[in-house]
Amino acid sequence: MRRSTAIVVLLLSGTAPSLSAQARDVSGQRDSFQRAVVHNGKWLTAASVAALIMFAEREHNQSRRAWNALLDICRSAQDACALASDGRYVRSDAEQLYQRSRAYDRRANHWLLGAQASLLATTALFIIDLHPGEGPGNIPFAPLQVGLRIAF
């Protein structure tokens, strides 16, 4: 209670004009903050692309393991992978492996869609981070214009 009262007293006693003066200087800080967020954010989104692809690969590998186990069942006997009238496998273990494989594939697809969205965001941030008219800081000389004229 005392702290809020002290803040109100300070604001009313004349610090409000200095706060408004500081607010004008904040616009430059805001621009540099936004530039830093874009500059560093592009690397964060690029790293997230790699991470999401790794997650998708893990899910795909699990799907492939379940699918290979289903193929082993199907190769074990001639009628091991017979289908019922509703399209499901007659054997419950074969149906379970098939459903597990599909579930892992769906998850892998979701991870890949996230990676694609993150790649789009990364591309946008790289484009936003371009500074038109400004050259890179590591080139000490201005570009030279070299030409050749041939008179006829």
Image: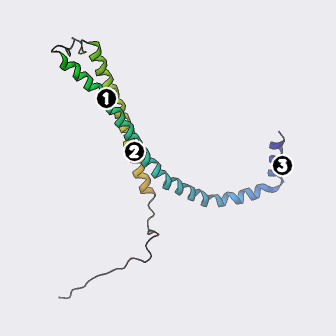
Element assignment for label 3: helix
The residue at the point 34 percent across, 80 percent down is 145
Q: Is residue 52 above or below residue 107?
A: below
N-term mark: 3 or 1: 3
What element does badge 2 sit on?
helix
Q: Amino acid at mark 3?
A: Val
How many marks on residues?
A: 3
What mark, if any, has residue 102 been given in the picture? Answer: none
Front position among marks 3 and 1: 1
Q: Residue furthest bottom?
A: 151
How far apart, in angstroms, are the residues tagged by discs 3 and 1? 66 Å
Q: Quadrant of residue 3?
A: top right
Q: Tell me which label, 2 or 1, sits earlier in the chain.
A: 2
Closest to the observer: 144 or 13? 144
Q: CA distance from mark 2 to mark 1?
A: 20 Å
Q: Nearer the viewer, residue 142 or 77?
A: 77
For disc 2, the neighbor class at 10 Å (few under 14, some 14 to 19, many from 20) is some
Q: Residue 96: image x %, image y %?
A: 31, 18
Q: Residue at x 64, y 58 (%)?
A: 26
Residue plotted at (34% across, 28% down): 104
Residue for badge 2: 50
Report the amino acid beneath label 1.
Ser
Q: Earlier in the sequence, mark 3 or mark 2?
A: 3
The amino acid pointed to by label 2 is: Ala
Measured as percent of width and height from the top left, residue 148 is found at 26, 83
* CB within 8 Å, label 2 to label 1: no
Q: Is residue 80 left or right of residue 43?
A: left
Residue hosting label 3: 9
Circle 1 sits on which residue? 63
Q: Position of residue 27 (x, y in %)?
A: 61, 58
Image height of 69 relative to 34, above or below: above
